[in-house]
């Protein structure tokens, strides 16, 4: 079982920035998609941003222009640069590595808390 290890969460004020990172601990066949999701208590986990193995990003509408997803395929790492943070961005952020073809898998990190105060 591969572990995804996240880092970079914390407490910031509105308008500030944070950078989240995620790395796979252990050998892994390259995923098709890497992504970031977030969840607040009482709500479903929601998509924030994904990036394909060819580098095509997709963003949640509310984070476009503020968040940037990037990856290093050789090191199997994933980052999320979050600028101009808002209180509504407060959540636990999870990284996800997914492979849709054989050998398929769907790995999640343990989550990292991001808190944005107003």
Image: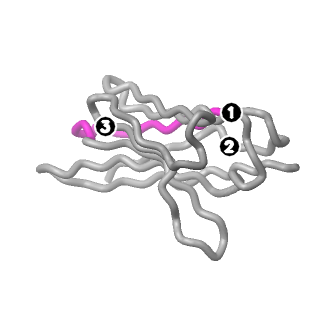
Badge 3 marks a residue whose secondary structure is strand
Tags 2 and 1 touching, CB below 8 Å: no
Neighbourhood count class around disc 3 (C-alpha, 10 Å): few under 14, some 14–19, many 20 upward? some
Q: Going 25% across and 54% down the picture, which residue do you hit?
A: 105
In the rendered view, tell whether residue 86 sits above or below residue 46: above
The one of 19 and 64 positioned closer to us in this rendering: 64
In-image side of 39 versus 77 (left or right): right
- The magenta region covers 18-31
- Residue that numbered label 1 is attached to: 83
Q: Which residue is mark 3?
A: 52
The extreme right residue here reads 118
Residue at the far left: name it: 102
Q: CA distance from mark 2 to mark 3?
A: 23 Å
Q: Which residue is mark 2?
A: 9
Give whichever of 56, 2 is nearer the camera. 56
Q: Residue at x 53, y 71 (%)?
A: 44
| Residue at x 24%, y 48% (from the top left corner) | 99
- Residue 97: percent from the left, percent from the top? 35, 47
Quadrant position of residue 65: top right
Coordinates of residue 109 in the picture (x, y in percent): 48, 52
């Amino acid at each position: 079982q591969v572990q995804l290890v996240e880092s970079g969460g914390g407490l910031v004020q509105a308008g500030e920035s944070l950078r989240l990172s995620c790395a796979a601990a252990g050998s892994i066949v390259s995923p098709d998609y890497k992504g970031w999701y977030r969840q607040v208590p009482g709500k479903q986990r929601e998509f924030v941003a994904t990036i394909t193995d060819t580098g095509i990003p997709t963003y949640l509408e509310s984070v476009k222009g503020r968040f940037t997803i990037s990856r290093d395929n050789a090191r199997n790492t994933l980052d999320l640069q979050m600028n101009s943070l808002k209180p509504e961005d407060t959540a636990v952020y999870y990284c996800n590595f997914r492979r849709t073809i054989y050998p398929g898998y769907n790995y999640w990190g343990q989550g990292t808390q991001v808190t944005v105060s107003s």
